[in-house]
Amino acid sequence: MQLNQEQESPSVEYLCDYVYIDNVKLSHYYSQLSSNGLVVGSKRITKEGGKQGSSGTVKIPVLSGGMAAETTNEHSLEINIDAAFSRPQETLDALFDAGYISGGLSNSPVGALVLVKGSITLVDIRILRDLWVDMGEMVAANETASIQNIKERQRVAVQKKKEFEALAKMIAKLPHSLQGTLFTDSDAAWFTLKPECLLASADDLTFKHGSALQGEWHTLGILDALPDGLYFGSDAQNYHQLSPIEIAMGTMLNGVREGLGRPVDRYGITPIMIFRTTKKIAPESLE
């Protein structure tokens, strides 16, 4: 890529290929770290000038002397900078420098900012919701194909159809959710994504990768939940103070969470940025 006069080549060891940026949360952190609040744009003006002189002599009868002239040349270059595109990296650097980022899940408290890397799986509930009925019929047909007795095959097929129809009614009421898991070397963190914050469409990711995104991904996020059995906060001790309706609702919601949300053995995070890194290519590899 050729650089124009207005551009400068930054000295960086890698570039960030962002696939997800929650600009609202990112801007909240940025504004707290900057003495100027949220900077949405800036302007840089460069001025260059110089002086050019000339001189000469004149000879006139009776009078003689000299004269000199000096001119000043000045031009300026004005550059308008959109801060939105540099804000993710600037915020990440500022959070690091200020000591707000933890590098692991197991040694961080709830509410901490963490930067972790690993592999990612992603599931689009919308696709599951739209295709569930057809998928159910295909699964039922495959599971009953090996049954030789016709009546038994029909009975099992009817039973499977009822099971899938019951699940289809529940799935149809689910909100559109993009959910996934980040697997590190030692832990796993469950999350959901806002579709409007994706820099690539959910359909593109699904049809390109299936459920597992290839490559190593870095995630900056807020640690929201610990695996069941590891959290002993004050609110966890107040279960005996709940009313009967709260206990009943809690039991139901816990079942929904375990079946359709965060598994009991995983952390829960709210992603702010998800990206992979593009490192410089050695000159010899281009030959």
Image (cartoon, rainbow, N blue to C red):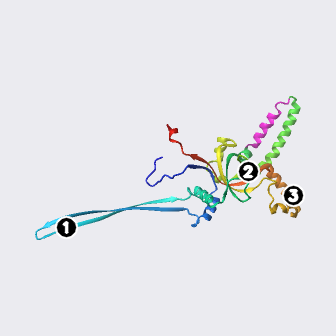
Disc number at residue 66? 1
Start and end of the magenta stretch?
Answer: 131-147
Disc number at residue 5? none
Amino acid marked by disc 1: Gly
User: Principal SS element in the magenta part?
Assistant: helix
Question: Which numbered disc, 3 or 1, marks the residue closer to the eye?
Answer: 1
Distance CA(mark 2)–CA(mark 3): 25 Å
Residue furthest to the bottom in view is 62
Amino acid marked by disc 2: Trp
Label 1: state its secondary structure: strand
For marks 2 and 3 on the same chain, the one whose residue lies earlier in the sequence: 2
Residue that numbered label 3 is attached to: 248
Label 2: state its secondary structure: strand
Indicate the position of residue 13 as horizontal and vertical percent values: 55, 49
Determine whether, in the image, residue 8 is placed left or right of residue 140: left
Question: Which numbered disc, 1 or 2, marks the residue closer to the eye?
Answer: 1
The crowd level at tag 3 (other Cα within 10 Å; few <14, some 14-19, many 20+) is few
